Amino acid sequence: MPKPPPAAATTAREHLLPPHLECLVLWECAGMLGGILRLPAPLKRLDIVRNSGLTSLEYLSGGHPPSLRALDLRRCSDLAFLPNEPQVYKSLFFLEITGCPAIKKLPRCQQQQLGSIDYIRLDAQYKVTEFKALKLKTWKEIPRLVRERRQASRS
């Protein structure tokens, strides 16, 4: 009869940060943090660049609403889950998520906040576009509509 795997191997690792932490910058920490990173509410800035192993970001529930102002996630190969709580993104003014292939789509509450964020840099797969109903009278109008949307996206 085979031995069962150790308990640590069957559950995701969780990392708790100091409860009063306001800034966390992790650069090139491949394998150092794996599993779930639980973020304290006072955190204002979070930068994670080139991390493999980290799969999820979650907020600790508490009496204070999250105060995250800047979120920078780049080249986090295994990161798949972001907090899906509207209050997490209410204070956000800087957002960059690039090179994170495990994130298939942004949480709905984060998508709804994109219009109020000053600086946004996202991979194309996360771009949320507003689709308006097209009322074409002829196919000849398509080039004009394409030009208008390109101009709107540049401004």
Image: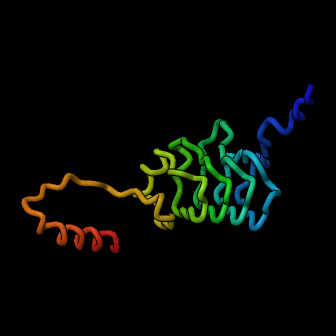
Q: Tell me the quarter of the picture where residue 129 sits.
A: bottom left
Q: Residue at x 56, y 64 (%)?
A: 96
Q: Nearer the viewer, residue 59 or 27?
A: 27
- Give the residue at the far left of this rendering: 137
On the rendered structure, is 80 left or right of 110?
Answer: right
Q: Tell me the quarter of the picture where residue 68 sits.
A: bottom right
Q: Residue at x 69, y 62 (%)?
A: 48
Q: Nearer the viewer, residue 79 or 116?
A: 79
Compared to residue 140, the image places residue 39 above or below, namely: above
Q: Residue at x 54, y 62 (%)?
A: 95
- The number of callouts visible is 0
Image quarter in which the C terminus is found: bottom left
Q: Residue at x 11, y 69 (%)?
A: 140
Q: Say how the picture is coloured.
A: rainbow
On the rendered structure, is 51 left or right of 1?
Answer: left
Image quarter in which the N terminus is found: top right
Percent of width and height locating residue 108? 46, 45
On the rendered structure, is 140 left or right of 57?
Answer: left
Percent of width and height locating residue 144? 17, 71
On the rendered structure, is 131 left or right of 8?
Answer: left
Q: Nearer the viewer, residue 131 or 15?
A: 131
Percent of width and height locating residue 15? 79, 46
